[in-house]
């Protein structure tokens, strides 16, 4: 990672009451509180000119759901990680900052149940069937039971 970019991210992270951690050459992880995620990403876009959001990933962390935004600039990658509690899986949408984030947020909503406040398509299904039963948990939660999902969706095949 270029020293200038790393220094600027580290400085802003410290000002935002968070910390930037170098992972390996060309990669940095920044942990950001959900309440500050839009301000931090806005800073990356406007002040550091990090424009390429490669993807957003979700992860079941037990009590919380992790959300990681992966930005790429040349040979450098910035991972911005935040989390939301499973008891209230709501996060701020960044589609007003990065319109292309709409599909990534919908994917995390389908697979992990996170509602992105401000995403205009969040009530639509992207990966799950439209008739996904409301009482079934999202499929990538650790508490999901694949056999139960297959059975409820009529995907079980007869055993010979």
Image (cartoon, helix red, strand yellow):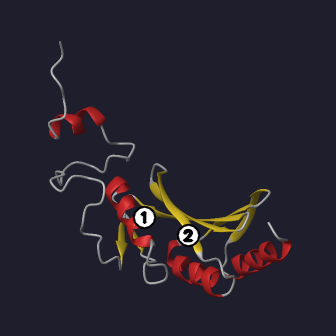
Task: Answer whether residue 30 is visible to the viewer in this image.
Answer: yes
Quadrant for the N terminus, please: bottom right
Q: Kindly give the residue lying farthest to the front in the view shown.
A: 74
Task: Answer whether residue 87 is visible to the viewer in this image.
Answer: no
**C-alpha distance separating marks 2 and 1:** 10 Å
| Residue in the image at 59% along x and 72% along y | 52
Quarter residue 82 falls in: bottom right
Is residue 11 placed above or below 145 in the rendered structure?
Answer: below
Q: Kindly give the residue lying farthest to the bottom in the view shown.
A: 46
Q: Is residue 43 left or right of residue 135?
A: right
Residue closest to the eye, 143 or 147: 147
Task: Name the spot of residue 75 as percent of width and height, x first.
Answer: 74, 63
Is residue 140 placed above or below 85 in the rendered structure?
Answer: above
| Residue in the image at 49% along x and 83% along y | 97
Task: Name the spot of residue 6 as percent of width and height, x first.
Answer: 78, 72
Determine whether the residue tagged by mark 2 lies in a helix, strand or loop. strand
Q: Kindly give the residue lying farthest to the right in the view shown.
A: 3
Task: Name the spot of residue 116 as percent of width and height, x first.
Answer: 37, 71
Task: Name the spot of residue 60 as percent of width and height, x first.
Answer: 45, 50
Q: Which residue is mark 2?
A: 53
Is residue 128 placed above or below 120 in the rendered structure?
Answer: above
Q: Which residue is mark 1?
A: 104
Looking at the image, tell me whether mark 2 or mark 1 is earlier in sequence order: 2
Is residue 142 placed above or below 134 in the rendered structure?
Answer: above
> Do labels 2 and 1 touch, CB within 8 Å?
yes
| Residue in the image at 18% along x and 55% along y | 134
């Amino acid at each position: 990672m270029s020293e200038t970019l790393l220094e600027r991210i580290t400085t802003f992270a410290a000002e935002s009451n968070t910390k930037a951690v170098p992972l390996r050459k060309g990669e940095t992880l920044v942990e950001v509180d959900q309440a500050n995620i839009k301000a931090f990403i806005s800073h990356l876009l406007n002040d550091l000119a990090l424009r390429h959001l490669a993807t957003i990933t979700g992860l079941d962390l037990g009590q919380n759901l992790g959300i990681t935004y992966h930005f790429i600039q040349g040979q450098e990658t910035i991972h911005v990680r935040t989390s939301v509690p499973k008891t209230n899986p709501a996060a701020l949408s960044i589609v007003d900052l990065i319109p292309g984030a709409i599909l990534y947020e919908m994917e995390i909503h389908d697979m992990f149940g996170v509602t992105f406040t401000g995403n205009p398509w969040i009530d639509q299904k992207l990966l799950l069937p439209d008739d996904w039963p409301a009482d079934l948990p999202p499929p990538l939660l650790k508490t999901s039971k694949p056999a139960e999902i297959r059975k409820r969706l009529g995907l079980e095949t007869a055993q010979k």
